[in-house]
Image (spheres, rainbow, N blue to C red):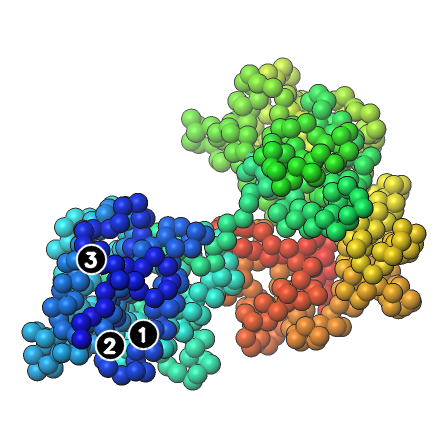
Amino acid sequence: MQGEQGEIRSAGPAGSTMRQEGWTAGVTGSLVILAVEDGDPEFAKAIDEQLSVVTQWWGTDPTTEPGFVQTVLRAPQERHEVEMFLHTSGIRETAEDEPLVVYITSHGAIGTSLRHFLILPGTDHARLLATAMPTNEVVTAALDSWARHVLVIVNTCEAEGIDVELKALVRDLARTRGEGTLNVLATTSARSQVMGREFALILRMASEWLQDAAGITRPHLSTMEFLHALEHATERLNEERHLALPGPRAVQQARLGVRSPTLPNPGYRPRPRVVTGAREEVSADYDELEYWLDRASGRVDSDDPGWYFSGRRELNRQLVRFLSGPAGVLVVTGTAASGKSAVLARAVTLSDPTFRSSLRYAAAVSNAPADGVPPAGSIDAAVSARNRGATSLIEAIGSRLGCEPDRSRPALDPLRQWQEGLRAFFSGDGETVTVVVDSLDESSDPTACIRDVLAPLARHVAGTAASGTATIPAQAPCPAPDAAQPPGLAPDTPAAPARGLRLLLGIRSSRPGQAGITDAEPGGLLRELRHAFPQAQVLRTDGDSAPTDVAAYITALLSGTALDTDTAALGSAAARVAAHVGRSFLDARLAAEQLRRSQGAALLNDPLWFSQLDRGTAGILEQDLDMIADDGLDKAEAVALLRATAFGLGRGMPWAELWPAVAEALLGAPIKQADEKIRRLLESRIAGYLTHDTEDDRVVYRPAHEQLAAVLRRWR
């Protein structure tokens, strides 16, 4: 029987076309598979399972660029068939820019010389040199090709036995690869049998883990990340089946931590970018926009594209007036959960030229009230101060404006270099620019951000007030700015800037007449902003119109539900809920979601439910947690998993091993099958309490609002 050899272009059966010269033109990756059978039908099935997952992982899915052409030699009988395959496949001549992956699965053995051999059906164990295939001849055929990026996976008996000989052979490689990655993985130790079905399961589990828990957002993995996924899967398989598999390890490694085109990330899911990068941090995210577009599509009797685009009209008008006017400062402020970030995100999103030119969102833009749509390109940079210090914030602003830190004075620390860089930027020619800074109160050091980042920009803004807004009222003078502030950057430095600045700031504050640490106590943030920008305008999101806006928001959220029988009934339900949630858009959304799940009528007739609404976010969350068993989750574990995200730094908590570990620490007990329980949580009734983001090429999770995070951190 002759070995079966073929070239395939997808994760299906091998085809019959054998490639004779090199690789197919235009193909960006190659997968070469050598699968040696032993005549046992069960071993053949095990190979089938391996090849199924391998060809799926290194397939031609357009979301895992580059695609891979797959060349397979299946069931060779004798050594010369493998040698001919190495010649005819062109593996040694793989092009420099073509990622090469080689997968070897077979029985194997280590000879007395410590050389590793592939065992073929025609092998005479007394004559390994003549009748078996030296494994490293296949490995080095790949490593000594022209390809800069090579990955070889050896899944055989005693695979680790290739190590000694390979270490000597790699010294004879034709050349160095510079920025390339040459890695060889062995799946078994020197005294263990080939993993057939087991390695197929490990690969499949690793792929599943990479698709959610790992949270890696890049299209390609590093070899270290790939090994970590395999180790995680091996540990899980050992636990589930009471095994003691050692797991794969690298026997030849080069730049393990560098992402490689040989390793497509099965968890990579490219998502449309809603706005350009300079505005992305504060804009509405893709999920939010899709939600409102979906809600709008269910209202066939209206051309309203959704409350997100049409609600809070007066606030939006005032914001547009500021963005259309001269240089100045506008502070958007209000109590917790009163919609400050949503108002800013809407303005940032609608100002973005990419968003406005998108056919998908064309109706949203055209149907939004014209006087509530900012001019295209009117916002140049938008950043969040959440969990940022002064240096991080000024770097975020400066880099988005396209300016550079002043490297000519290396004695200056990075903060001062960026201060000098921004001063040079605003001293140059150019039109007035607009910068949005949201969540100032959520900075790791708000006072430093105001003193060292925002205050030095004061001389680039004008103090005129726009119609419909109020100047921050004068109060007792604030302490003088920090004496350490660099010369020439103080806000009162007399200079005529060549480039103006509109500064749009989002910050939480207590309502007028109510004491709050953010503005009433000495050193409060609004006092510091008042000192830096005496003529700043203020726009409150919790004013007299807020209850009406909350009711309109609830109406939009409930449209299309069982409560939407007529306009009067829907309006009455929304008004009743709004009366209990006050000015909190967060509580309004959570209450509306409970109504949507329950069909509404029962809860609207339940005094206990309204008493829970009166308790605010904590009361609504408690009610959802009381029903979490319906989603297959334990309440105590669900609370721990939710609370863990509230302690994440930066933009959120990555999943992987960290989220389960923090949850277990908070719970004070292990959480069995934690990954599966996190998956259930993200599909449960409390999924709406979380939002996700991206940081350092990882998906991260955090509470949907800082007020909710504060509730969770205090939860007992």
Determine the secondary structure under disc 1: helix
Residue 342 percent location from the top left of the image: 72, 43
Q: Is 232 situated left or right of 83 in this image?
A: right
Q: How many marks?
A: 3
Residue 81 left/right relative to 635: left
Task: Please state which of residues 664 and 230 is positioned toward the viewer in this rendering.
Answer: 230
Question: Residue, x 53% and y 22% (percent of image)?
Answer: 424
Tag shown at residue 37: 2
Asked where in the image residue 134 lies, by quadrant, the reply is: bottom left
Picture layout, residue 248 above or below residue 177: below
Q: Residue 611: image x %, image y %?
A: 88, 64
Q: Residue at x 88, y 45 (%)?
A: 548
Dots 3, 2 in contact, CB < 8 A: no
User: Looking at the image, is 573 positioned above or below residue 384?
Assistant: below
Which part of the image, by quadrant, shows the N terminus?
bottom left
Q: Which residue is mark 3?
A: 89
- In the structure shown, which secondary structural element does the residue marked by tag 2 occupy? loop
**SS label for mark 3:** loop
Residue 686 visible in the displayed image: yes
Q: Nearer the viewer, residue 525 or 157?
A: 157
Q: Are marks 1 and 2 in contact (CB under 8 Å)?
A: yes
Q: Where does residue 29 sit, x and y in percent of width and height?
A: 31, 52
Mark 2 packing: few (<14 Cα in 10 Å), some, or many (20+)?
Answer: many
Could you classify mark 3 by the number of other residues whose Cα lies within 10 Å: few (under 14), some (14-19), or many (20 or more)? many
The amino acid at mark 2 is Glu
Reading the chain from its start, which is encountered first: label 1 or label 2?
A: 2
Seen in the picture, residue 549 relative to 252 is either above or below; the reply is above
Mark toward the start of the polypeptide (1 vs 3) = 1
User: Which amino acid, by three-letter code, is at mark 1?
Assistant: Ile
Q: Which residue is mark 1?
A: 47
Percent coordinates x, y for residue 333 in the rendering: 77, 40
**Which residue lies at the image location 34% right of the left edge and 55% below the top edge?**
68
